[in-house]
Image: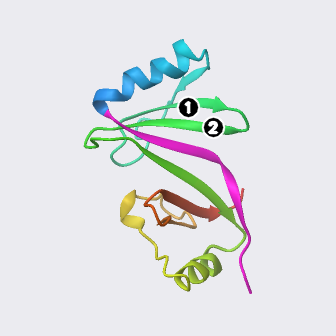
Amino acid sequence: MRPRFTGGRNIAMKLPKVRFDRTVAFYRDVLGMEVVESSDVDVAVGVPRSVSVQFGPVTLWLDRVDNYSRADLWLELFTDDVELATRHLAGHSVVPQDELEQLPAGMAAHWFTNPVGIPHIVRLAD
């Protein structure tokens, strides 16, 4: 049995503190996209500030990560069975890397990386 994977609605660009404001200004002022500041006090562990940009059918999250020296792109995948997906990926030598970022308590999900190191969250579809 093979799990079903589909692309999610969220992409996160993890940005160093020194480039955060310029990157937000690029999407807001240069491209003219609406930028919405996250109202969550604790966006995620290690992410003191986050804004969202509606990027066509997906939401692009610009996350400030103070200890980063370069930007990273993080992707979201949905599946119908997280545990089956985890076993399937393990069969292809792709193992969970949940140490990348703490998941909310009770969330059925795992972090993985693709062969070039791009993090993907694999979680239950909404």
Query: How is the model colour-coded?
Result: rainbow
C-alpha span from label 2 to label 1: 6 Å
* Residue that numbered label 1 is attached to: 52
- Residue 121, image x, y percentages: 54, 60
Asked if the magenta segment contains residue 59, the reply would be no
- Residue type for callout 1: Ser
* Residue that numbered label 2 is attached to: 59
Q: Say if mark 2 contacts mark 1, CB within 8 Å.
A: yes
* Image position of 22 with respect to 80: above or below: above
- Residue type for callout 2: Thr
Does the magenta stretch mainly form a helix, a strand or a loop?
strand
* Image position of 97 with respect to 40: above or below: below
Identify the residue at horizontal 58%, vertical 83% (top origin). Answer: 87
Q: Secondary structure at mark 2?
A: strand
Residues rendered magenta in the picture: 1-16
Horizontal side, residue 12 vs residue 57: left or right: left
Identify the residue at horizontal 45%, vertical 61% (top origin). Answer: 116
* Image position of 49 with respect to 9: above or below: above
- Residue 104, image x, y percentages: 48, 57
Q: Along the polypeptide, which appears first: circle 2 or circle 1?
A: 1
